[in-house]
Amino acid sequence: MKKLALLAFVFLASCYSPEQYEGKMASGNIAADSEFGTVYEVNGGKQICNPSVTMDAERYSGAMLWLNFSGTLNVNETEGFTTTKVGEHDRLTISDTAGNVLWFIMLDSVGAECEFQDPEWSTDSDYIVALAGSNAKGSRGCDEVEYKIVAIRLSDKAFITLSDSVVDEAANPHLWLGERSAKVDSTDKVAKFFGTSQIKFVYKNPAGSLVYVDYAKSPKPKKLKAPANASGNMLDSPLISPDGNFIVYDKLNSSYSWNSYIQELSESSSPIEMERTADMLSNPVFPHWWQFGSKLFVVWTEFVDGNSYLNKSDLTNESTWNRSLGRTSMREISVTAGAPNDVALAWNGDVREIAPIPLIGGRSPDGHFIASGTNNGYLLYIP
């Protein structure tokens, strides 16, 4: 059943030079109750991209990180955050199911001129990572943009640049942090910023290869082997596992065809394709790790054959709740670093359906929320 939220409002996974999608206009977020949970609009009626579910169930419960388009935003204004005359990709926003802006940061706060791209919550709840774009040398008006990877601390909005070279807008970085330590080299600005020297990040370089940095060993990026027939910008959205040893990612052949892989963070490792079981609607896409207690899962999305992963349908509409667009699924997995490929991972049990609608932004640590976006933004609450 649809209902207006109590508070009224006074493509690839990234948004590359987009043709803006115009959804329906709304004066408030819509929430819809279903047997599988409650579907909440995020920035209702306006396009978003790069949805990343909360990693902090205390400070940012029932929330997600997302990237905006230009024009107006359908969230509640807060001090320093305007919802009109908004510039495309000019801020990063964390908002909740009621449309409240819980946190935001503007471009100039990280010394950038043109736009943000590819925001993603890190494995540490107090840090996010994104691309910050500024004018290339000799360029004006952001007609030629250079990007660097920045990590931002949510608690004080401090930031640090992680990439020592320029990357492109399809880099899709992700950051993993180990346990914080009271004993950190005060002369090491990176370790000091994070409170640990156990730092890893992964991204796609301008040549289209996935590379990773294991900072405790070397700040130099190491190249990962690619799946067969992968070229150009096909590899997408690498995410590091909770133990810091593996990644999941996509190979996007087109908007209608894809494969997903799991791979150890090692120069000698080979990608292992995620299997499609007989009950699945499609190959898995947009895989995310989800740790729940001692159990590790991979959460992914499936789309009905012929449907693009760029969903423009209204997921608060009951007519979409029958798997006609796709669904969100997960499966328990065990991974072993350093093992041969045939025993490096083991699937445990059957594929479980989480929701009969396609959601692409990951599952929160407490398991109660799943995010989605590109084009419309949603949070699903699972009771």
Image (spheres, rainbow, N blue to C red):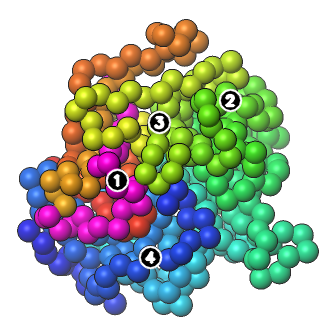
Residue 339 is a magenta residue: no
Give the residue displayed 76% in from the left and 68% down from the top: 145
**On the rendered structure, is 185 left or right of 249?**
right
| Residue marked by disc 1 | 306
| Residue marked by disc 3 | 260
Which numbered circle lies on residue 224? Answer: 2
Q: Which residues are magenta?
A: 293-319
Alpha carbons under labels 2 and 4: distance apart? 35 Å
Q: Secondary structure at mark 3?
A: strand
**On the rendered structure, is 146 left or right of 334?**
right
Residue 55 in view here: no
Q: x, y (%) of residue 284?
A: 38, 39
Give the amino acid at mark 3. Answer: Ser
Mark 1 / mark 2, whichever is N-terminal? 2
Mark 4 / mark 3, whichever is N-terminal? 4
169 is higher (above) or lower (below) than 198: below
Q: Secondary structure at mark 4?
A: loop
Mark 2 / mark 3, whichever is N-terminal? 2
Residue nearest the viewer, comparing 338 with 263: 263
Q: Quadrant of residue 247?
A: top right
Alpha carbons under labels 4 and 3: distance apart? 26 Å
Q: Quadrant of residue 147?
A: bottom right
